[in-house]
Image: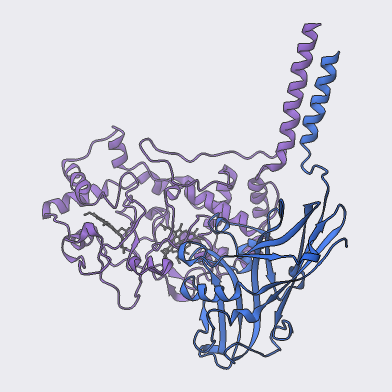
Chain colours: A purple, B blue
Amino acid sequence: MKKRISIFLVATVSLLVVLLDACKKGDAVTGVPGKVTTPLKLIIPAGWPQPSTDIFAGNPLTEEGFQLGRKLFYDGRLSKDGNFPCASCHQQFAAFATYDHQFSHGFNNTFTTRNAPAIFNLAWMKEMHWDGGINHIEVQPLAPITNQNEMAESMINVLLKLKPDTAYARLFTSAFGDATINSQRMLKALAQYMGSIQSYNSKYDQVKRGEAAFTVSEQNGYTTFKAKCNSCHTEPLFTDNSFRNNGLAVDPFLKDVGRMGITGNPSDSLKFKVPTLRNVELTFPYMHDGRAFSLSQVIDHYRSFIHTEQATIDPLLKNKLLISDQEKVDLANFLRSLTDKELLKDPRFAQPL
Amino acid sequence: MQTRFYLLVFAIVLLSGCQKTLETDSGNVAVKLTNMLGDGPITLESKTYINAVAEPYTVSKLRYYITNVRLIGTSSAAEAESYHLIDAEKPESLQFSFTAPSATFNSIEFLLGVDSTRNVSGAQTGALDPLNDMFWTWNSGYVMLKIEGNSPVSPVAGKKFEYHLGGFSGPNNVLKKIQLPFPAGKLASIQKGKTCEISIMANLDKLWAGPNALSIAATPVCTTPGAQALKIADNYQHMFTLSDVVNNK
C-alpha cells in the first residue's frame, strides 16, 4: 500500500510539473511550439567587468535573431534610395567605422556632421553617439534611418519595403515565431546583430592571456599609456564611457557643443563620449569631427594643442600631457597592438549571401 | 485512498490557479475624452482660435499620451499595459476601456506623458511604436504632447508653430500626474458585468495661459526638452476636468 501511494505521488507531482510548465509557455517572447530558436550568449572575456546593463533584456539573443539583424544591417532598402545601408558607413574592415572618411556620405550628396564611430562591445556602452543622446541599443537605428543626411527614410516606408519580401517573412518567422514584420522586431533584430559584435582578440588581449609578448617598444608604450591615457580610455574596454572635454578647438562651422546639446547643462559644453581605442589603427580620422588624421596628430594634441583655457576642460588635461618623442613612438606602437584582425575578417559579421 | 483524494483536490486547486483570469467580480471602465478649444470641441485646420495673448491660430495636429491609468478608492485598480495615444485626427483614440474589480472609487489618476521606464527600455510597440512619430530619434525619449498649427504672427517659415513637448529625467521632466476626484454624488461604482463611463474634458486653452503665458510670436517652436518645455507643461497640466461619471451602463 505504502509503495503504491508513493508511486502515485511521484506520478501526480510529475504530471503537475508538466502541466504547470505548459501553462507558463504562453509567456515566451519568441518561438512558437515546434519552432525552436537557438540561444546565443554574449561572451564576457576573462578579466572584463560585467556589462552595466543587460542590452538583451526583453530581447533574448538567438542565432535566428542575429541572422535577421545581419541581413537588415546590410540591406540598402533601409535607406531612401537603396544606397545607404548601415554597412555603407559602418564597414567591417574598419572595425565598423567609416574607413578613411572624416565624415560619411549620406543620402543625396550629403555628409554626416560627425565622424562615424566603430561598432563593437556595445553591451558595455550605456549611452550611444558622441553626445550620448541615444539611451538604448534598440532605438539607435531610428536616428540614422530617419536622418536626412544619412539614410533619409521613414520607418513606415522601410516596413512597406520589407513586407512583400518572402525571405524576410521566413527570417522574421524563425526569429520571432511568426511572419509579423513590425518596427519593434526589426529594431530588436538589429540590436542582436550589433550587440554581438565583440572585439577581444587583439595582440594586447593575447599578451594579457599569456599567448603572445609585447615588443620592447609596445611594452614601453603600454607603460606610458597607463600613466597618461588610462584614466579616461580605461582598460579593458579602453573607455570609461564618460563624457569629457579633451580640449579641442571649437569648429566655427559645426559649432558642436556635444553633451550639452542633450542635457542642456552648460557644464556639459564641449564634452564628448570618450571613444574606445580598440582598433584605433583603423578608425582614423579621429575625434568626433574626424579632425585628426593620424595617431601622431592625436598625441601631438595631447602634448601641445589642448585648449586649456576652455571652461569645461577636463582637470586631467589642464596642464597638457608631458610625452617625449620616444614615448610618442612607443605609445603609437602600443595603440596598434589593439587591432583585432579576427574581428575584421570574421565571416559571421560579413554581408550575408 | 484518502491520500489519493487529497492529492486530486490539491492538483485541481493548483491547476485552476494556472488559469490567468480568475473569475473575480469585476466590471468595465470606459474612459472618454473630449478635446476642447475655444467654445467647444476642437476643430482641426478650418477654425481660427485666439490664444491668451490675443494671437489668432489654427491647429493642424494634436497628440498626447495618457498612461498608467488607475482608479483610486480604499484600494486602487490599475489598467494593465496602460498606454494611450490621444490623437485629435483619430476619433477612435479618444476612448478606451479596461476591467476593474467591483468596488467604489473616489478618483481617477493618470500620467500625462510616458513614464520614464518606457523612455529607456528600447523598442516599444502599440501606442508607443516609434511609427507614431512621437519618439525623438536624436535624443531618445517620447514627445509627451505635440501640437502644431499656423498663425499669421509666427515668424518662422510657413507661419507655423510647433510644440513637441517632452523630457522625462532630472530637471527636464515634464511628466505630470493628473488626479481627478469624482464629485460626491458621482463616485465611480464598478459592478459586475456593467460599464462605468468616465468622461473627461481636455481644455487646450490652458496650453497658452496659466503660470507662463505662451506667445506664438515670441516662441513659435519648442522641440527639445528643457526650460521652455517645462514652462508650457506647467500650463497644460491644468487642462483636464472631469465632466461626468455614469454608472451601470
Residue A87 position, x and y percent, is 47, 59
Q: Position of residue A200 (x, y in %)?
A: 37, 42
Q: Is residue B246 above or below residue A216?
A: below
**Res B110 quadrant in image:** bottom right
Query: Which is more toward the observer, B249 or A67?
Result: B249
In which quadrant of the rendered image does the N terminus of chain A lie? top right
Rendered position, A48 above or below A156 = above
Instruction: Classify residue B12 by image quadrant.
Output: top right
Occupied quadrant, residue B66? bottom right
Q: How many marks?
A: 0
Residue A330, relative to residue B119: is it above or below?
Answer: above
Residue B183, percent from left and from top: 76, 67
Q: Residue drawn 37% across and 53% down? A: A241
Residue A72 seen in the current view:
yes
Give x and y (percent) for residue B228: 49, 76
A33 vs A331, left or right, is: right
In the image, B102 versus B90, the foreground residue is B102
